[in-house]
């Protein structure tokens, strides 16, 4: 299956599940393919045939943008170099959850989250330590007795009850011993903090020297500017004093006014409608004030505005922002 067809299939699946889905980010390079939102659930999706193509720089950028937009970065893929991705399993690449299409279907359409995650050494599940301790005590077993039944140390059983994850084999043994499920779902949409890599969100890259002119304009207007490297926008800009992060967040781009600029502005408008932000594209000159929800502002016009409130009002007026229905 071609990558374009795979993206189309994933988009159709999300729409069937009730998500609003952005236009495909058909630019190069691209850190994510589509944004999708259902109520409070917001995901940034990268779709790949072979997930080995998902590199560290893309993973870091998706995690950064996810943090700025309060979204979960997610990869949907078919295989690695060595094998097909297993259903009902969450994998991780560079701190980003990875699902097969079948696992994504279960999660988004059927509402059935995965129980298993892959980590170095094999496949694991999260044990509910409180339930395990209750079942052991109901049976009248000591830590040592349960350890003997499992063929592990007393210390290991104690760690399971403290919340340490277990291999699938141990989880199956526990369920056979007590006749009850003891595992917890992997909370993919909340970032799966208990099993994902513990690295903090990577720092934003420095702004390209060519971008500094616009960074200065946005900073003067009271925005904190987070440059990007592979997104269809140059930066995510946040109003420093805004109580509502979505209301005060602006996807920001700039270039000469070309067909490519029009394309990027359309994508930014589509992503902004789904994510719940505005978008602005700065150009040298333009004959219109917006493109499909993205405000167009000439650089000299922006630089001539001294009042931050006037500048923000201009973006709001031209962005023609309307919240996308969930």
Image (spheres, rainbow, N blue to C red):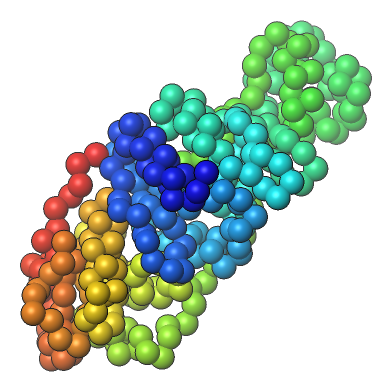
Q: Where 188 falls versus 127 (above or below)?
A: below
Q: Can residue 33 be seen in the rendering of this structure?
A: yes
Q: Where 108 falls versus 208 (above or below)?
A: above
Q: Is residue 95 left or right of residue 207?
A: right
Residue 72, image x, y percentages: 45, 49
Q: Where 179 falls versus 32 (above or below)?
A: above
Q: Is residue 319 left or right of residue 254?
A: left
Residue depicted at x 47% and y 31%: 105
Residue depicted at x 11% and y 61%: 320
Q: Is residue 139 left or right of residue 55?
A: right
Q: Quadrant of residue 145?
A: top right
Q: Can residue 194 be seen in the rendering of this structure?
A: no
Between 263 and 59, which is closer to the camera in this rendering? Answer: 263
Q: Is residue 58 left or right of residue 15?
A: right
Residue 17, image x, y percentages: 35, 31
Q: Quadrant of residue 276?
A: bottom left
Residue 128, image x, y percentages: 64, 26
Residue depicted at x 29% and y 68%: 264
Residue 132, image x, y percentages: 70, 21
Q: Quadrant of the C terminus?
A: top left
Total marks in image: 0
Between 241 and 313, which is closer to the camera in this rendering? Answer: 313
Residue depicted at x 29% and y 57%: 271
Between 136 and 77, which is closer to the camera in this rendering? Answer: 77
């Amino acid at each position: 299956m071609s990558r374009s067809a795979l993206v189309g299939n994933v988009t159709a699946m999300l729409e069937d599940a009730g998500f609003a889905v952005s236009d495909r980010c058909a630019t190069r390079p691209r850190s994510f393919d589509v944004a999708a939102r259902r109520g409070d659930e917001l995901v940034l999706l990268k779709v790949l045939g072979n997930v080995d193509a998902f590199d560290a720089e893309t993973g870091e950028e998706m995690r950064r943008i996810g943090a700025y937009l309060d979204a979960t970065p997610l990869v949907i893929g078919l295989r690695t170099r060595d094998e097909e991705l297993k259903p009902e399993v969450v994998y991780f690449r560079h701190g980003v959850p990875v699902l097969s299409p079948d696992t994504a279907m279960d999660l988004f359409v059927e509402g059935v989250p995965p129980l298993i995650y892959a980590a170095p050494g094999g496949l694991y599940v999260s044990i509910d330590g409180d339930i395990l301790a209750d079942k052991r005590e109901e049976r009248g077993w000591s830590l040592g007795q349960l350890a003997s039944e499992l063929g592990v140390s007393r210390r290991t059983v104690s760690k399971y009850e403290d919340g340490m994850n277990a291999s699938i084999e141990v989880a199956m043994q526990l369920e056979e011993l007590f006749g009850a499920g003891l595992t917890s779902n992997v909370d993919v949409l909340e970032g799966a903090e208990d099993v994902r890599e513990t690295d903090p969100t990577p720092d934003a890259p420095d702004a390209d020297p060519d971008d500094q002119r616009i960074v200065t304009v946005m900073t003067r207007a009271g925005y904190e500017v987070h440059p990007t490297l592979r997104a269809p926008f140059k930066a995510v800009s946040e109003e420093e004093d805004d109580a509502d992060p979505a209301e005060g967040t602006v996807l920001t781009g700039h270039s000469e006014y070309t067909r490519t600029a029009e394309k990027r502005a359309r994508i930014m408008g589509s992503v902004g409608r789904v994510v719940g932000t505005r978008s602005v594209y700065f150009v040298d000159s333009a004959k219109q004030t917006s493109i499909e929800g993205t405000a167009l502002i000439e650089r000299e016009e922006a630089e001539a505005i001294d009042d931050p409130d006037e500048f923000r009002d201009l973006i709001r007026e031209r962005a023609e922002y309307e919240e996308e229905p969930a």
